């Protein structure tokens, strides 16, 4: 199982020397919303798939999943719970 982590948008914009305003212009997404994702203040925490894909295309990413850090968690099994 995978768990979504921190949004990498700040780092990706910095690497591309692109401002939030420029990303907003290229995607049509409100700059304030982009700022919320960057600062992890969005209520949901993860952008919708439509926005994810739009931003990934604007940043020329190979995959929309590159916009977030991901960690793998071990599944909880009855055996592992019983041994704790």
Image (tube, helix red, strand yellow):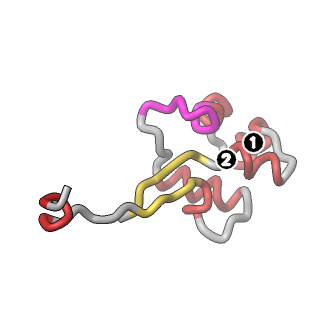
Tell me: residue 43, above or below residue 14.
Answer: above
Q: At 47% across and 45% down in the image, what residue appears?
A: 46
Please state which of residues 82 and 70 is positioned toward the viewer in this rendering: 82
Contact (CB < 8 A) between labels 2 and 1?
no
Q: Which residue is mark 1?
A: 25
Residues in magenta, as a range: 36-43
In the rendered structure, the answer to whether residue 28 lies left or right of residue 72 reads right
Q: Which mark is residue 39?
A: none
**Looking at the picture, how far across and down is residue 26, in whole percent?**
74, 48
Q: Is residue 30 in view?
A: no
Residue at x 55% of width, y 62% of height: 65
The structure residue drawn at horizontal position 12% and vertical position 60%, both measured from the top left corner, is 82
Q: Is label 1 in a helix, a strand or a loop?
A: helix
Classified by dominant secondary structure, the portion drawn in magenta counts as loop
How far apart marks 2 and 1 lie (CA) works out to: 15 Å
Q: Is residue 43 above or below residue 57?
A: above
Tally the numbered discs.
2
How crowded pointer 2 is (Cα within 10 Å; few <14, some 14-19, many 20+) is rated as many
**How dense is the environment of label 1, judged by Cα within 10 Å: few (below 14), some, or many (20 and up)?**
few
Q: Position of residue 38 (x, y in %)?
A: 64, 37
Q: Is residue 8 left or right of residue 79?
A: right
Name the spot of residue 1 as percent of width and height, x first.
Answer: 35, 65
Secondary structure of residue under mark 2: helix
| Res 61 quadrant in image | bottom right
Q: Give the number of the disc on residue 9.
A: 2
As drawn, is 27 to the left or to the right of 51?
right
Q: Nearer the viewer, residue 9 or 19?
A: 9
Name the image quarter holding the C terminus: bottom left
Does the magenta segment cover residue 39?
Answer: yes
Residue at 81% in and 46% down: 14
Give the number of the mark in front: 2 or 1.
2
The furthest residue to the right: 17
């Amino acid at each position: 199982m995978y768990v979504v982590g921190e949004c990498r948008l700040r780092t990706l914009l910095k690497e591309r020397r692109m401002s939030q305003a420029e990303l907003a212009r290229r995607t049509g997404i409100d700059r304030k919303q982009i700022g919320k994702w960057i600062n992890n203040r969005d209520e949901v925490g993860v952008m919708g798939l439509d926005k994810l894909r739009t931003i990934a295309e604007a940043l020329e990413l190979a995959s929309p999943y590159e916009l977030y850090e991901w960690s793998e968690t071990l599944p909880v099994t009855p055996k592992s719970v019983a041994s704790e």
